[in-house]
Image (spheres, rainbow, N blue to C red):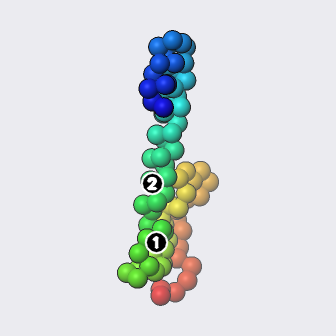
Amino acid sequence: MIRTAIEHARKHPGLIPQFFFICLGMGGATLYLIRLAKGPHVTWNKTANPEPWNKLDPTYQYKFVAITTDYKNLKKEGPDF
């Protein structure tokens, strides 16, 4: 499949930017999925720590980009478990 793509790129050089941006998008999506999978609120080992989100600080920023929320001024809203 890669050989076919290279042959098409040699025959039609206008496809090279398209292949570049497709690979860039796939790489970015892969890196974002890896980032999501390594988050502190994801459980991979349920026997060692079944609820890792209970140990997070109340000022932890859950969203990738938080525009209107100021996490520095938040206070904890509940008891420690």
Residue on which the image places disc 2: 35
* Callout 1 amino acid: Thr
Q: Is residue 25 above or below residue 17?
A: below
Q: Is residue 6 above or below residue 11?
A: below
The residues bearing labels 1 and 2 have C-alpha atoms spaced at a distance of 14 Å
- Identify which residue, 34 or 5, lies in the foreground: 5
Q: Secondary structure at mark 2?
A: helix
x, y percentage for residue 29? 51, 44
Residue 57 in view in this figure: no
Q: Secondary structure at mark 1?
A: loop
x, y percentage for residue 48? 37, 81
Residue located farthest toward the left when viewing the structure as drawn? 48
Q: Is residue 48 toward the left or the right of residue 20 in the image?
A: left
- Identify which residue, 26 or 10, lies in the foreground: 10
Q: Is residue 3 above or below residue 63?
A: above
Q: Quick one: label 1, few (<14), some, or many (20+) residues within 10 Å? A: some
Residue at 48% x, 68% y is 42
Residue at 53% x, 61% y is 62
- What numbered label is drawn on residue 31? none
Residue on which the image places disc 1: 43
* Callout 2 amino acid: Arg
